[in-house]
Amino acid sequence: MKVYVGADHNGFFLKEKLMDYLKKAGFEVIDDGNKKLDPVDDYPIFAERAVKDVLSSDDSDPRAILICGSGQGMCIAANRFRGIRAAMGYDHESVRSSRNDDNANILCLPARALAQDDAYDLVDTFLKTPFAAAERFNRRLAEIDKLH
């Protein structure tokens, strides 16, 4: 599975740690963030990079992880694109249900609120939880796809 990882300055250090963690776990990791810390960069740039990579990926189930201070800005920016289902990851159950019920393809993390080990745990849940594909979940996702 390809995992695209993007972050602004608030998430830069967590992004670097997560990328190492994911590579060691055997994932193909693509850095869609800055290569060096820039304290005045803007999160929409990195959200767009990761979104475009997910949408154009040749992987059968590409995912992205986006990190900013609160996680909310990245989530808002990513969800502007059709075909993206970005979810905030603030605890295990929110992440599990975003995958199981909503087939989330992007996880947004709040760098200011998460310890490194907690971020690893949420990422593991995001990457290991399959979409249940229950009829009601598929129906709801089809309804979302019809929204303008």
Image (cartoon, grey):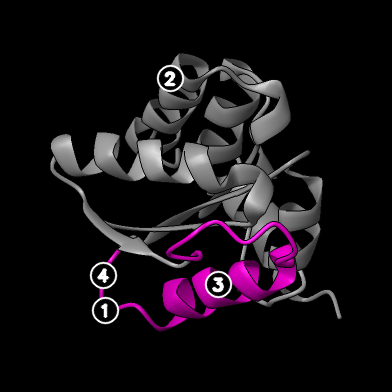
Type of amino acid at the residue the image marks with label 3:
Val
Q: Position of residue 37 (x, y in %)?
A: 55, 56
Q: Position of residue 38 (x, y in %)?
A: 62, 61
Residue where numbered disc 3 is placed? 51
Q: Which mark is residue 121?
A: 2
Q: Which mark is residue 58?
A: 1
What separation in Å lies between label 1 and label 4 (alpha carbons)? Answer: 4 Å
What separation in Å lies between label 4 and label 2 (alpha carbons)? Answer: 23 Å
Question: Mark 1–mark 3 contact, CB under 8 Å?
Answer: no
Q: Position of residue 43 (x, y in %)?
A: 71, 63
Label 2, secondary structure: give it. helix
What separation in Å lies between label 4 and label 3 (alpha carbons)? Answer: 14 Å
Considering only order in the chain, which callout, 3 or 2, is on the residue closer to the N terminus? Answer: 3
Type of amino acid at the residue the image marks with label 1:
Asp
Between 36 and 8, the one lying in front of the other is 36
The residue at the point 34 percent across, 77 percent down is 57
4 sits left or right of 92 in the view: left
Q: Badge 2 local density, few (<14 within 10 Å), some, or many (20+)?
A: few
Label 3, secondary structure: give it. helix
What separation in Å lies between label 1 and label 2 (alpha carbons)? Answer: 27 Å
The residue at the point 20 percent across, 48 percent down is 27
Considering only order in the chain, which callout, 2 or 4, is on the residue closer to the N terminus? Answer: 4
Question: Mark 1–mark 4 contact, CB under 8 Å?
Answer: yes
Considering only order in the chain, which callout, 3 or 1, is on the residue closer to the N terminus? Answer: 3
**Region of the chain picked out in magenta, as a range:** 33-60
**Does 87 lie within the magenta span?**
no
**Does 48 lie within the magenta span?**
yes
Considering only order in the chain, which callout, 3 or 4, is on the residue closer to the N terminus? Answer: 3
Q: Which mark is residue 93?
A: none
| Residue 134 visible, this orientation | no
Q: Nearer the viewer, mark 1 or mark 2?
A: 2
Residue where numbered disc 4 is placed? 59
